[in-house]
Amino acid sequence: MCWSIRHLLGEEKLKELLFDYETSPFLVVSDGFASGYLPKPKLPRAFLGENPDEKKANRKKNWLRLEDLQHGNFSNAIEVTKDKTFTVMRNSINYKTFSTDDSGAFSPYGVDEMHIEPKDVYCLIDEERFALDVLSHVFDFLRNHGYGKDTTIGKGRFAFVSFEAVDVGKSTTTVMALSPFCPEGLVCEKLYYEPFTRFGKKGEIEPIKILSKNLFC
């Protein structure tokens, strides 16, 4: 999103938007979730109401409807259709000799590609600094430009439908993060999370390595 803003609105505008991002973010973007669902919280099984004898099955049931999440009906989690991965066979070519290798032998190799099922992405925006129509314009640029490390060969493009307002319900003392972040300075009575390392692929100058956490508190 930041690279798209830089291309469309200029580097100075991006710097202006990012200047106070840690204290007053202009935009927060979630992960992509199975359409119509939100992820099951990263909580101990005792809090999720799961049958301890069905650990394997429960690990696959990672998605909840918004109303089930809001009311704590975690046992209603289900398994949804996964993204499909398939292998495409290719062949290396030496462009100096226009042959497959020095000997001219056929040397195929497989490349894994993925078909992504429809996703919901949640965006929280400061409309005084970053209007919805600007976000839509930037998102439209991103979908046409492509997302990921293979955009230069036409990968990573996606269909974008529309933005819809989401009513998250009443205020509460319990919250769940919808995107990875480091909870530095966050005060919680109890904090549950699953750490992982993300290796960024979108940077057009150099990749960025980010240690992220998905949490529920």
Image (cartoon, grey):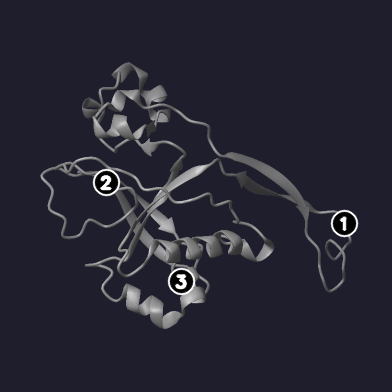
Three-letter code, disc 2: Leu
Going 10% across and 44% down the picture, which residue do you hit? 189
Three-letter code, disc 3: Ile
Three-letter code, disc 1: Ala
Q: Estimate the x, y position of residue 101 in percent, counting from the top left.
A: 83, 63
In the rendered image, which residue does mark 3 sit on? 5
Going 45% across and 59% down the picture, which residue do you hit? 199
Dot 1: within a 10 Å radius of its alpha carbon, few (fewer than 14), some, or many (20 or more) residues? few
Q: Estimate the x, y position of residue 98 in percent, counting from the top left.
A: 87, 68
Whether pointer 2 and pointer 3 mark residues with C-beta atoms closer than 8 Å, the reply is no
- The part of the image, by quadrant, that contains residue 192 is top left
Q: Quadrant of the C terminus?
A: top left
Dot 3: within a 10 Å radius of its alpha carbon, few (fewer than 14), some, or many (20 or more) residues? many
**Considering depth in this image, is 204 or 170 the residue closer to the camera?**
170
Q: Secondary structure at mark 3?
A: helix
Q: Quadrant of the N terminus?
A: bottom left
Mark with earlier residue (1, 2): 1
- The part of the image, by quadrant, that contains residue 181 is bottom left
Q: Nearer the viewer, mark 1 or mark 2?
A: 2
- The part of the image, by quadrant, that contains residue 48 is top left
Q: Estimate the x, y position of residue 42 in percent, counting from the top left.
A: 29, 38
In the rendered image, which residue does mark 2 sit on? 215
Placement of 39 over or under 18, stated as above or below: above
In the rendered image, which residue does mark 1 sit on? 105
Q: Estimate the x, y position of residue 60 in percent, counting from the top left.
A: 43, 29
Mark with earlier residue (2, 3): 3
Going 16% across and 60% down the picture, which residue do you hit? 185
Mark with earlier residue (3, 1): 3
Distance, label 2 to label 3, CA atoms, is 28 Å
Marker disc for residue 31: none
Dot 2: within a 10 Å radius of its alpha carbon, few (fewer than 14), some, or many (20 or more) residues? many
